Amino acid sequence: MDILIDQFFNVAIMQKAFPLLLKGLWMTLQLCVAVILLGLVGGLFVALGNLSPRRWLRWPTIVYIDVFRALPPLVLLIFIYSGLPFAGINVSPFTAVVIAFLLNNSSYYAEVYRAGLISVAKGQWEAAASTGLSRSQSLVYVVLPQAVRNVLPDLLSNTVEVVKLTSLASVISLSELLYSADMARSVTYNASPLVLAALFYLVLLWPLVRLVSHFQRRLAA
């Protein structure tokens, strides 16, 4: 029992690793902000294209959603970071992660947005038009707020998955939280930094998980 505590909950090692993990956490937060914001915006445009009556706009978005939902994000990440240089395209680890996760997550966000937009009754468009709003104004001020409210738990749930997905960035040696913890583990020959990183993720994600549950209960009621 003492050996397990020393290997996984060594307070002295956790204290030494704490500054390094804080730097890794800062990198993780930067990744989350970039990927989530770009994914939300990109997903909305993809969803609008997917619902367009114009075939030349609708079909490319259908292919986009299917392809990037089917491709494993890790495969996409390694291809962008390690494969594109063979074509003369070199990107930094941070940029590679943002591009890979943007392509992957915007396809999932697009499906959530699409479900929300479909859930809004057609009469809402007609009511907005009767007040003199243009179609774009009706979308922004009337339809989209209702659509987002209807699928808010799904948007938040997908966001939780995005945050967890950032741990894959350690594969290409980006100094985010998991990579920093693994470096500390390799130096100390102790798993306590990994346990500390898990606690960081728990503190970061638990409020979001509870928020998802809260909105799910409200919608069910």
Image: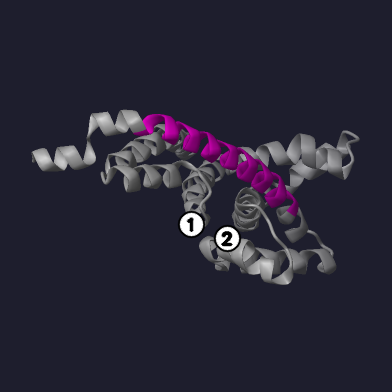
Tell me the chief SS of the magenta region: helix
Count of all numbered marks drawn on residues in the image? 2
Q: Residue 35: image x %, image y %?
A: 62, 45
Magenta residues, as a range? 17-45
Q: Which amino acid does label 1 sit on?
A: Val
The residue positioned 61% from the left and 48% from the top of the image is 94
Q: Which residue is tagged 1?
A: 171
Q: Quadrant of residue 108?
A: bottom right
Q: Mark 2 points at which residue?
A: 77
Q: Is mark 2 on a helix, strand or loop?
A: helix
Magenta region includes residue 36: yes
Picture layout, residue 145 above or below residue 115: above
- Give the residue type that dot 2 points to: Leu
Tell whether 74 sits left or right of 1.
right
- Tell me the quadrant of the picture where the N terminus can be found: top left
Q: Residue at x 46, y 47 (%)?
A: 164
Q: Which of marks 1 and 2 is in front?
A: 1
Q: Which of marks 1 and 2 is nearer the N terminus?
A: 2
Estimate how packed mark 1 is, as few (under 14), some (14 to 19) or many (20 or more) residues with alpha carbons within 10 Å: some
Which quarter of the figure is the C terminus placed in? top left
Q: In the image shown, does 217 or 179 lie closer to the viewer?
A: 179
Horizontally, residue 119 falls left or right of residue 190, namely right
Percent across and percent down for residue 210 are: 41, 34
Of 65 and 7, nearer the camera is 7
Residues marked 1 and 2 touching at CB (< 8 Å): yes
